[in-house]
Amino acid sequence: MFAIPGISALIIFILARPQEFLPLLQRVPFLHLFTVLAVLGWVIDVRLRRLQPIAAPTLPWMLAMVVWAIVGTAVVAPAKTMQRILELTSLFALYGTIAHGVQRLRTFQFVAGVMAATCMFIALVCFHQGLSDKQCVGGHEADGEIFGVPDGRLCEINDHCRGSDAEPGVEYRCEHVGVFGTYSVETRVRYRGELHDPNEVALTISAGALSLMIGFALRKRKSSAGVFFFGLAAAIVIYTVFMTQSRGGLIASMLVPGVYLVRRYGLRAMIPAAMVALPVLLLGGRSGDAADVSNQGRYDAWSSGLDMFKHNPLFGVGVRNFTEHHYLTAHNAFVLTLAELGFPGMVMFVSVVYLTFKSLIAGLREIRGVPGTDAANVWGMSLLASMGGILFQINTLSFAYHSVLWIFFGLVGAWTSAIRYHRPEFRVQMTWRDIIIVVLICAAFTLFVLPVFLKLKGAA
């Protein structure tokens, strides 16, 4: 498969960002290069009949959302149109090459392995960061964090950094310092690039490392060494999520194995699972004033997002323009699309999410009890667990255009294509009934759920 090398390199360079901490890699625009290689590889595979030119169920809705986002931005913020075209085209190419360049379970498992290994690498970097000594990081503060470099002085609290050795005019924070130029924010571990937010790190390693590692463990369950290795990796991921102090991330990491338990034992498995998860949630995450300030800021952002929608219900304020109208990001993928893409754009985004889950559920139902479908079942459940955690946490994250989400949209499309390759009669599509359901959900959220919730919280 000629598309696989480009797809694999894209996943690594978009998430792990080696080009940011290895100077030698900064001379070449690898992201653009690998995007072109992935697309060309897909074209070659189709010409050689190694791939079938079959659209994934989500393709029409993804394409419609991208086109709508570009048109809307051209109308409300024409100066930023070209930049948004480049960004959205790259995202669409990432999704499209994964969803359509992988149509066999063997190649799917390889790409899933690349995703799991990349996310595990990120988890290990953050794990090491959380266990490392605190150092003084000097620079300038903005948006509640500091941008600077560690100066090597050990510390325990911020005041230790403001002694006689401090540089005049420089702000200091006492943070955990890791490898590759990474350091924590308010002692919460994080990575770099798109994953500089601890909450996004927690979601990414829960969905991309924990869930996929469970999938590999189930595939290797006859090997005690394999089970031990993947079990150790899962334990590291869970503890790293704990060190992000992300409440949503902790719940997402609990939802991943929870999906497996419910699938295996039914809803009765929720009771013992909740008993195990409760102390973890109580001990992890931020609490007190920090949590209250975070919640209030989130509610204010949602209220501003609703105002942006009311100002222009058709196109919103344009892609990535939320922060032009509010000092914080939306902290909710659905509020973000409503505010930036208008009601039609939100319907398209929710349709993609809806179709993603419909594809997984329909596919698992299609292969249930069919001999020789163990691998397909394992990876279908792994993706369902990942998407379950993602769906929960994007309610508190501006994740609508995040590479991790689009990668998983692509992986689900690839898994669906693999099922269809072996069972050509298998089809998943949006029916008129599905469209009506999605429109009603979006309308209820926009006109009733969100306004009432904000009023109850005093943020309306």
Image: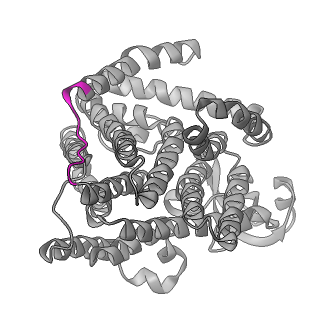
Give coordinates of residue 172: x percent, y percent.
Answer: 74, 58
User: Residue pushed farthest bottom?
Assistant: 24
Q: Which SS type dominates the magenta stretch?
A: loop
Do we see residue 177 in this rendering? no
Q: Nearer the viewer, residue 133 or 276?
A: 276
300 or 416: which is nearer to us? 416
Rendered residue at 35%/31% (across/down): 338
Residue drawn at 31 percent across, 55 percent down: 419
> Does 312 appear above or below 237?
above
* Residue 229 image offset from top left, x and y in percent: 68, 70
Q: Is residue 338 magenta?
A: no
What percent of the width, then of the height, locates residue 218?
A: 57, 60
**Relative to 240, is 379 on the left or the right?**
left
Q: Based on the displayed image, in which of its 4 quarters is residue 86 positioned?
A: bottom left
Residue 329 in the image: above or below residue 154: above
**Residue 14's quadrant in the figure?**
bottom left
The magenta span reads: 424-433
Q: Is residue 70 positioned above or below 31 on the image?
A: above
Magenta segment: does it hold 427? yes
